[in-house]
Image (cartoon, rainbow, N blue to C red):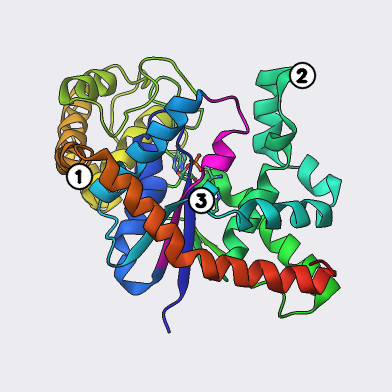
Amino acid sequence: MKKRVFSGIQPTGNTHIGNYLGAIKQWVASQAEYDNIFCIVDLHAITVLQDPKLLKSQTRELAGLLFAAGIDPEQSVLFAQSHISAHAELAWILNCLSPMGWMQRMTQFKEKADKQKEQVSVGLFTYPALMAADIVLYDTDLVPVGEDQKQHLEYTRDLVQRVNSLYGDDTLKMPTPSIPQVGARVMGLDDPTKKMSKSEDKPNHAVNLLDPPKVILKKIKRATTDSLRDIRFDPERPGVYNLLSIYQGFTGQSQAKIESHFEGKGYGDLKKELGEVVVEGLKPIQTRYAELTADPACLDSLLAQNADKIRPIAERTLKRVQEKVGLG
Ligand code: TYM
């Protein structure tokens, strides 16, 4: 039996090369080895206010983008979270089993709450319980994610242990995070001390997967570096380190090979070559995306069919938990 992989991505804004290198690329690369379920997490998206029409179209477009990036419908199930109500139902139970203190430790919430102040939603606070529900509903073994989701995965594992110690070891399966060696934390091009993020709207912050070649080249050309010269993987120099890591993520070459390639060259050369590598890497995705989204109804019906396929797995787990807890 193949191990079960589950992961998710929010249909909010522009999907960027951080999402690609940290998550999507590894989902695609290991598809044949596992039994895969990938989820467009629209319920997570509404933890901040969304335009209803836009949310629907972004869900469909993200499905197109993931298929274009290489998610193979023969090997992986891609669906929208809100199509399976068991996610929200299990999340409620898990909310009730989560100690408040565990949630209060989540750094991602603290960062977002700092920005949104009193307007921050209760849903954003309990977001990790919904994420835990997503994962455990499918008896997941492995969760491939970028570095920023590590704390949410640790919370999920603590919660599984707590639930199993309360209701029996066979209640929930313990998942393991899988974080890539390269590209787990792509930083902002404008500020390499901050994670590349969808919610940052500065023009030169992120390279989006659907950016035209000209825009990609321009954004990389403007990336923040430093006033030194040599091109090395030195974490003390976050700008150059970030550019080299993106280069490594797209080419798959070793650090030593990349450093020797750039020996004696300047930052201008690094930016030019990186721009070309990223443009070339994204070109096939962009071409397929245009073909796939030409028929939106087809994507909608594929998402609906996929949800129908896996709903019984989620419902079985929900029932098991409900019985253990004394519900239903
Ligand atoms: P989201 O939509 O923010 O990001 C999707 C995936 O992209 C990764 N990622 C990055 N990787 C490297 N560098 C970056 N700058 C970068 N930014 C984002 C994320 O780590 C993620 O793997 N909470 C999740 C979605 C989710 C989920 C789940 C994931 C909901 N339920 C269950 C796994 C399992 C999120 O908001 O991802």
Separation of residues labelled 2 and 1 (CA atoms): 51 Å
Magenta-drawn segment: 36-50
Tag 3: amino acid: His
Separation of residues labelled 1 and 3 (CA atoms): 50 Å
Compare marks 3 and 2 and give the one earlier in the sequence: 3
Name the residue that disc number 3 marks. 83
Q: Is residue 92 magenta?
A: no
Q: Quadrant of residue 260?
A: top left
Q: Residue 193 versus residue 5: which sits nearer the camera?
A: 5
Name the residue that disc number 1 marks. 260
Tag 1: amino acid: Ser
Judged from the image, the secondary structure of the residue bearing numbered disc 1 is helix
Residue behind label 2 places its C-beta within 8 angstroms of ligand 1? no
Residue behind label 1 places its C-beta within 8 angstroms of ligand 1? no
Q: Residue furthest bottom?
A: 1
Q: Which mark is residue 118?
A: 2
Tag 2: amino acid: Glu
Judged from the image, the secondary structure of the residue bearing numbered disc 2 is helix
Q: Is residue 13 left or right of residue 214?
A: right
